[in-house]
């Protein structure tokens, strides 16, 4: 970096210790020792400290799997740039006085680029023999192949040739102090520098990711396009089609497929631009699209072979109308079944659809793809319907995407390639295993499940400081160039208010990162003057550590540890279990708000809690990653928080937030996944009153959806909490029908509560036998009055009682919730 046209230097100091090594299979050597080497790039100068060292001999103590070394580390460097950032190589050896010391493994760490103390782990791996004879000799002598120069592990050269096995892991505790690093333009708290997932990478992945970090830190970030297909993600053709508004919905164009190959299509459009001096009319562009793009579907209808119009669970439902409603929902599955046409497999380059082998259930409406997080609740419903074979095929499709892309994208379209959605794959596998105990299926796909988790560790991990401590958690970070292809016009238009290209780029990243969350869009991602005020141009989703994402990921780590124990692989089980504990502990330390008695998202920019109601606040309960003794001790406080928020008081469901912004993931919309999350979180409190409240929330939701179904003969993706059955609104597109996850959650609730739930369709039926409404938090609603509220869901019947309820709710909001229910101007 230059300062006043003179190259200057920054200083970096590392101090700490190599603490211990863990061998999950047990320690079979009486005496072990470690050697370390620190390596650095050509522009780095060591000023003090030792670049290598050897520990004393050590053995396991009370823990038969753990050997403690506590070998000190300390070095000071000076450098002109961050290329060649120091790395630590740890070599573990067993002492032998007869055959010579033998290797037990190597571990590599990127010394942390963020200031402050950190605890890091890295897998201990050792090379395997390339021949059967070599493997036999290793077994016979207890000696394993060694690298001629372990430093090759930090260079990336020929690493892909190594065949290695995991043998355990090494833990270090280290602190970094820097001087003049930020002054020279390197922000060692920026997201690009702090993808702490590098600390958990296998050696073969470490170098590539390390180089990515350094390149991003040293220069302005050169982001990749949204996907590898220019027609759909990064071309003048895309820009002109979307900005001319050839289609009202931007998604329509990128869902069309080509008549010819991509190269010739782009060349033809370049010819059109030359003919029109880069100014084609809307009619010319429309004519081009009609000539070169096919609007026929890539999919064909598909009826699952295990579909049963009368599944067994229906017999457990006592209420006749509820049973009929459940059967109607079950009968929707075949209408949402799709399979990829053979033409997509034959000519994959002509389609934006990523082909998958098995049939699947689409969400519905404009969403004609396999979507990542939608699939979790769809699977829950399919399993209630007894469709295990379909579920297996759907999971295999997701695993196919992992094998093709290295991760599961937002949906099975190429234009979703550079962003994902909440990592629920292991949770889906867990649901399937619970229903089938199909361990062979798990064994077959365990590597893909692991690869999906590793993707999140590689790309979404963020290390940050609170006080004098550093923590590592996930945030959404979908870093790619330009607008979302499927919402190109909307994003491009919004970005024009920003004056610089850098700010526009950050806006696009934040927009895509919010879409990656599934909450597209919400004031949850808005930061203006340290609050949730503002509009879509105030979106800063990459500056927020979300509760639900980290709860989902902590559960995914727990699931992976359990899966590895089933395979079985004890070493990997221990590794993932260690990470799961670390993640759960960080959730508790960072996201638990002792003052409110609940969890909250963390604002990285302002270093404070975002103290707003969202159902996602209780996601650690839903995922079961909060420590059970802690939950038992704090359950009454958490329940009081939920009641005091008034988020559970509405007649049509649980609102996504308490802010009326016009965004679809805000008030007054209720979304099925969040209602399911809330009910399961209440159940997890293990309090009778919380369980009753969970039942009431579930029954309210089922009744509301039933009324909407009775009125419209369709199920919808979202509903309005203020009026039962009323369709939700807001956002970038009209409300969609179908709808996969809505049906899944309804069936989940009916399966859970079917024996006691009813639709209460009799005109004079009251709620006397249900838990009383929370009159302590509703001063306008007397207990005797609450008992007389009718819940009338009969189709087509004018329901003045709901009008009365809505009027009272409006008065209550004016008096008690005006602070949160503010109207926003976008």
Image: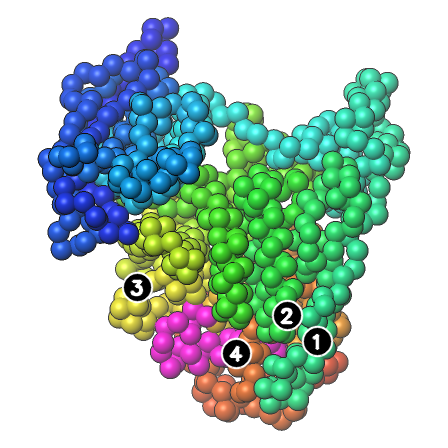
Q: Nearer the viewer, mark 3 or mark 1?
A: 1
Quarter of the view holding residue 18: top left
Q: Which residues are magenta?
A: 680-704
The residue carrying mark 4 is 752
Q: Residues within 10 Å of mark 2 (few under 14, many from 20)?
A: some
Element class at badge 1:
loop
The residue carrying mark 1 is 308
State if disc 1 and disc 2 touch (CB < 8 Å).
Answer: yes
Q: Nearer the viewer, mark 2 or mark 4?
A: 2
Q: Is residue 688 magenta?
A: yes
Does 684 sit left or right of 308 as displayed? left
From mark 4 to mark 1, how far is it between C-alphas?
Answer: 20 Å
Element class at badge 2:
loop
Q: Residues within 10 Å of mark 3 (few under 14, many from 20)?
A: some
The residue carrying mark 3 is 627
Of the image marks 2 and 1, the number of the one nearer the N terminus = 1
Q: Residue at x 49, y 56 (%)?
A: 443
What secondary structure predominates along the stretch shown in magenta?
A: helix
Of the image marks 2 and 3, the number of the one nearer the N terminus = 2
Task: Say which quadrant the N terminus sits in.
Answer: top left
């Amino acid at each position: 970096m230059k300062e006043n046209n003179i190259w200057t230097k920054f200083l970096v100091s590392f101090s700490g210790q190599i603490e211990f090594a863990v061998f999950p299979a047990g320690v079979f050597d009486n005496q072990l020792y470690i050697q370390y080497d620190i390596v650095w790039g050509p522009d780095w100068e060591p000023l003090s400290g030792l670049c290598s060292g050897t520990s004393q001999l050590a053995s396991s103590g009370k823990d038969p799997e753990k050997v403690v070394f506590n070998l000190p580390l300390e070095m000071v460097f000076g450098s002109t740039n961050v290329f060649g950032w120091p790395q630590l190589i740890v070599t573990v050896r067993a002492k032998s006085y007869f055959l010579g010391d033998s290797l037990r493994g190597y571990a590599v760490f990127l010394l942390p680029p963020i200031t402050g103390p950190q605890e890091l782990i890295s897998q201990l791996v050792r090379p395997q023999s390339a021949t059967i004879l070599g493997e036999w000799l290793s077994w016979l002598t207890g000696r394993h192949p060694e690298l001629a120069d372990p430093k090759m592990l930090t260079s990336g050269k020929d690493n892909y040739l190594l065949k290695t096995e995991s043998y355990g892991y090494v833990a270090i505790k280290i602190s970094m102090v820097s001087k003049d690093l930020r002054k020279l333009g390197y922000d060692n708290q920026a997201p690009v520098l702090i993808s702490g997932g590098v600390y958990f990478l296998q050696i073969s992945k470490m170098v590539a990711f390390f180089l990515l970090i350094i390149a991003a830190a040293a220069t302005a970030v050169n982001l990749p396009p949204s996907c590898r297909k220019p027609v759909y993600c990064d071309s003048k053709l895309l820009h002109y089609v979307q900005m001319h508004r050839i289609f009202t919905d931007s998604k329509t164009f990128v869902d069309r497929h080509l008549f010819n190959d991509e190269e010739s299509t782009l060349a033809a459009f370049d010819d059109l631009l030359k003919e029109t001096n880069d100014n084609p009319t809307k009619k010319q562009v429309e004519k081009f699209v009609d000539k070169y793009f096919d609007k026929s579907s890539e999919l064909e209808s598909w009826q699952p072979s295990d579909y049963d119009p009368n599944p067994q669970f229906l017999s457990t439902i006592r209420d006749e109308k509820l049973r009929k409603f459940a059967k109607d929902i079950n009968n929707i599955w075949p209408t949402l079944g799709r399979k990829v046409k053979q033409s997509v497999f034959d000519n994959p380059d002509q389609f934006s659809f990523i082909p998958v082998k098995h049939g699947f259930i689409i969400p519905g409406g404009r969403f004609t793809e396999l979507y990542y997080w939608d699939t979790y609740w769809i699977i829950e419903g399919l399993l209630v319907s007894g469709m295990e074979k379909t579920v297996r095929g759907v999971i295999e499709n997701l695993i196919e995407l992992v094998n093709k892309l290295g991760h599961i994208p937002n949906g099975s379209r190429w234009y979703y390639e550079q962003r994902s959605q909440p990592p629920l794959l292991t949770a889906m596998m867990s649901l399937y295993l619970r229903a089938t105990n199909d361990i062979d299926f798990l064994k077959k796909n365990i590597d893909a499940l692991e690869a999906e988790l590793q993707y999140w560790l590689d790309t979404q991990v963020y290390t940050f400081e609170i006080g004098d401590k550093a923590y590592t958690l996930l945030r959404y970070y979908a870093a790619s160039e330009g607008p979302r292809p499927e919402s190109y016009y909307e994003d491009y238009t919004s970005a024009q208010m920003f004056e610089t290209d850098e700010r526009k780029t950050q806006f696009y990243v934040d927009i895509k990162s919010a879409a990656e969350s599934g909450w597209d869009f919400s004031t949850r991602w808005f930061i203006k003057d340290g609050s949730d005020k503002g509009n879509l141009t105030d979106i800063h989703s990459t500056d927020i550590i979300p509760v639900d994402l980290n709860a989902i990921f902590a559960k995914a780590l727990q699931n992976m540890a359990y899966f590895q124990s089933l395979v079985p692989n004890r070493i990997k089980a221990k590794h993932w279990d260690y990470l799961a504990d670390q993640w759960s502990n960080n959730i508790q330390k960072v996201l638990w708000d002792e003052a409110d008695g609940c969890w909250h998202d963390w604002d990285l920019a302002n270093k404070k809690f975002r103290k707003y109601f969202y159902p996602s606040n209780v996601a650690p309960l839903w995922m079961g990653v909060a420590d059970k003794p802690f939950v038992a001790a704090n359950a009454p406080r958490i329940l009081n928080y939920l009641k005091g928020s008034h988020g559970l008081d509405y007649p049509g469901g649980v609102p996504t937030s308490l802010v009326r912004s016009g965004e679809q993931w805000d008030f007054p919309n209720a979304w099925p996944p969040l209602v399911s999350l809330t009910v399961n979180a209440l159940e997890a409190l293990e309090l009778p009153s919380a369980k009753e409240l969970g039942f009431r929330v579930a029954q309210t939701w089922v009744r509301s959806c039933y009324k909407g179904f009775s009125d419209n003969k369709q199920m919808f993706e979202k509903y309005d909490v203020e009026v039962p059955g009323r369709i939700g609104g807001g956002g970038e597109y009209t409300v969609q029908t179908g709808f996969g996850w809505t049906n899944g959650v309804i069936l989940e609730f009916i399966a859970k509560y079917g024996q006691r739930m009813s639709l209460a369709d009799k005109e004079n039926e009251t709620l006397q036998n249900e838990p009383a409404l929370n009159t302590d938090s509703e001063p306008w609603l007397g207990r005797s009055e609450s008992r007389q509220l009718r819940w009338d869901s009969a189709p087509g019947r004018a329901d003045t009682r709901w009008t009365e309820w809505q009027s009272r709710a409006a008065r209550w909001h004016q008096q008690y919730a005006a602070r949160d229910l503010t109207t926003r101007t976008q």
